[in-house]
Image (spheres, helix red, strand yellow):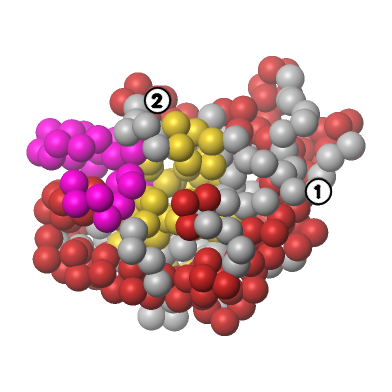
């Protein structure tokens, strides 16, 4: 069965599927097959980034698949090293070339990197790309309230999306409410907590009660909170499971029970560079999480 995914209407009127396929840590060659399989399962939204080194794999899937371009929603992200006005424009051209596309649906600043102090000028380049209609929507990723407020004060376009770490152990209530107040869609990265959320006893219990899998319970929790999700899996059975979320509903008591799993623990870096997680840091060179906060990519 192919599932049709409902959309979220972004603040500029563009519709974005509320479930997408994330391709972080899938090698470029494998990405083509994975993205094609995801599209066959019903995914119409794909989340990549220049950092992931697999934009061309995504592009080959789009070119080789049977879906018209306008039925797909493609997100990519500007990596930290390319922040700055001119370098952003150049990096965007390189991403488009790798994807083999003439526009992307959503372009995100991957991390604010406040220590570089370049995200405002970077955003101005994003506004230009948006005005030139080379992107249908512009947004940010890993921005905190302070970073968003600075964009509000110094630039014109309110980000359509903020893609943030968000899972049962890190529910981001304050940031979600801030987004809702300002018309920014919340997109959850690592929505399954990279698999960790699936073993929580309450999740397993609810899965049994609803006749669903733990992943479906967690993803359904996200959707009922209004989050856009981009779970990642290279297995077709899991891809199907992760998008088959639209014929059951958790009760408000279930949502309350799941809210109690908040532990305020990140799995990734703190965008302001205050990370204390043992897995902190992400190395762009190796493409791997590293356990050394000194190499944190988001030092303030
Ligand atoms: P995730 O929460 O999607 O977890 C992925 C892991 O969960 C997989 O390795 C798989 O083993 C397991 N899994 C997936 N479906 C499952 C299922 N149905 N049952 C059991 N296990 C299952 O974590 P993620 O890959 O870190 O995040 C998803 C996407 O978010 C990425 O692919 C990427 O596109 C995006 N992302 C963005 C940022 C950012 O800084 N903007 C950072 C990390 C990830």
Q: Residue at x 29, y 39 (%)?
A: 159
Give the left or right position of residue 157, taking residue 16 as reference. Answer: left
Instruction: Tell me which residue sits at (48%, 57%) in the image.
Output: 69
N-terminal of the pair, mark 1 or mark 2, is 1
Taking 67 as reference, is 82 left or right?
left
Visible residue check, residue 160: yes
In the structure shown, which secondary structural element does the residue marked by tag 1 occupy?
A: loop
Residue 121, percent from left and from top: 12, 53
Residue 139 shown in magenta? yes
- Which residues, given as a range, are shown in magenta? 131-160
Closest to the observer, 168 or 243: 243
Number of the front mark, 1 or 2: 1
Label 2 sits on residue: 180
Query: What x and y, as percent, mark residue 91?
Result: 25, 69
Element type at marker 2?
helix
Task: Tell me what residue is drawn at x 61 percent, y 78 percent.
Answer: 30
Q: Is residue 180 above or below residue 90?
A: above
Which corner quadrant of the image does residue 210 belong to?
top right
In the image, residue 263 lies at what x, y percent? 57, 39
The answer for how far apart the CA atoms under marks 1 and 2 are is 33 Å
């Amino acid at each position: 069965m192919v599932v049709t995914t409902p959309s979220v209407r972004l603040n500029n009127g563009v519709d974005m599927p509320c479930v997408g396929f994330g391709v972080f840590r899938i090698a470029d060659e494998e990405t083509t097959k994975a993205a094609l399989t995801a599209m066959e399962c019903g995914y119409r939204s794909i989340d990549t980034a220049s950092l992931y080194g697999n934009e061309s794999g995504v592009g080959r899937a789009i070119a080789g698949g049977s879906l018209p371009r306008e039925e797909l929603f493609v997100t990519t992200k500007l990596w930290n090293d390319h922040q700055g006005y001119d370098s952003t424009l150049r990096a965007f051209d390189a991403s488009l070339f790798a994807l083999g596309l003439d526009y992307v649906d959503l372009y995100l600043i991957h991390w604010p990197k406040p220590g570089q102090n370049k995200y405002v000028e970077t955003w101005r380049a994003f506004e230009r790309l948006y005005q030139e209609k080379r992107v249908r929507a512009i947004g940010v990723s890993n921005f905190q309230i302070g970073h968003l407020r600075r964009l509000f004060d110094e630039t014109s376009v309110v980000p359509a999306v903020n893609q943030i770490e968000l899972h049962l152990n890190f529910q981001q209530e304050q940031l979600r409410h801030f987004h809702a107040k300002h018309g920014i869609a919340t997109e959850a990265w690592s929505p399954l907590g990279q698999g960790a959320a699936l073993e929580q006893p309450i999740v397993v219990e609810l899965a049994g009660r609803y006749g669903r899998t733990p992943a479906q319970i967690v993803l359904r929790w996200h959707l009922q909170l209004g989050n856009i999700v981009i779970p990642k899996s290279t297995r077709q059975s899991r891809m199907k499971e992760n998008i088959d979320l639209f014929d059951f509903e958790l009760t408000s008591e279930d949502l309350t029970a799941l809210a109690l799993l908040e532990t305020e623990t990140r799995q990734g870096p703190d965008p302001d560079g205050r990370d204390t997680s043992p897995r902190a840091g992400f190395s762009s060179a190796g493409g791997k999480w590293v356990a050394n906060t000194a190499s944190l990519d988001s030092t303030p």
